[in-house]
Image (spheres, coloured by chain):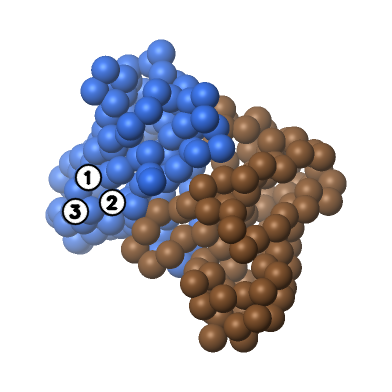
Amino acid sequence: NAGVTQTPKFQVLKTGQSMTLQCAQDMNHNSMYWYRQDPGMGLRLIYYSASEGTTDKGEVPNGYNVSRLNKREFSLRLESAAPSQTSVYFCASSDRVWYTEAFFGQGTRLTVV
Amino acid sequence: SQQGEEDPQALSIQEGENATMNCSYKTSINNLQWYRQNSGRGLVHLILIRSNEREKHSGRLRVTLDTSKKSSSLLITASRAADTASYFCATDGGTNAGKSTFGDGTTLTVKP
């Protein structure tokens, strides 16, 4: 039982490059989330998907796009990476949006040079 | 802007002592959650307290919620070195769910 799996774990991009962060959960959860965490700070919500087929912006959505591919998978895409997007990205899932505990992946450490 | 804000930013105690950290938030909520993050790892859920609850226990953890003061506290009793981590509160944002946020966390160091 893997829980929430994120790939890749580490990535270095050059400014302007694009990439997609992958996230999959095996707990049959309805809701999924993408957060970013900058050094010494808490998590900021980028996008979330309350249920399959829906996505909504969070606190810091600019520069990102998401796709809820199916109930299991929720991907985050950076179309044109910028140094300000250097961060650790966490994917999470929960049974229902906001009202139950969230389970987190181990994070993707992204550096944009 | 962030909904939940933890206090203090850092806390250092000896093993066996109790650790108390606080969280304040700005708008009404449906629930508040506490999470732990070990260095370089993802967050682990500790406890969820709903807006109609005042206190909740889980093992050595005790969480209180005061909706009139828009604040919560997390008490860890008889701390252990393994409790060394960052602790975050997260609120659901009430009617504005898309703005649910985490605070910057309290970094707890428990010295053996």
Q: Nearer the viewer, residue B2 or B5?
A: B2
Q: Horizontal and vertical percent for residue A87?
A: 50, 69
- Residue B26, quarter of the rendered image: top left
Single out the residue that lies furthest toward the right. Answer: A70
Label 1 crowd bin: few (<14), some (14–19), many (20+), radius 10 Å: some
SS category of the residue bearing label 2: strand
Left or right of A87, for residue A22: right
Q: Are marks 3 and 2 in contact (CB under 8 Å)?
A: yes
Residue at which label 2 appears: B106
Of callouts 1 and 2, which one flags the residue occurring earlier in the amino acid sequence? Answer: 1
Say left or right for A30 vs B78.
right
- Residue on which the image places disc 3: B11
Is label 1 in a helix, a strand or a loop? strand
Q: Residue A58's x, y, as percent?
A: 57, 45
Tell which of A85 and A30 is nearer to you.
A85
Do tag 1 and tag 2 residues touch (Cβ < 8 Å)? yes
Answer with left or right where residue A55 lies relative to residue B12: right
Chain letter of the residue carrying label 1: B
Chain letter, colour brown? A
Q: Chain of mark 2?
A: B
Under mark 3, the amino acid is: Leu
For disc 1, the marked residue is B7
Cα–Cα gap, marks 3 and 2: 7 Å
Which chain did the image draw in blue?
B
Q: Label 3: state its secondary structure.
A: strand
Q: Residue at x 37, y 58 (%)?
A: A41
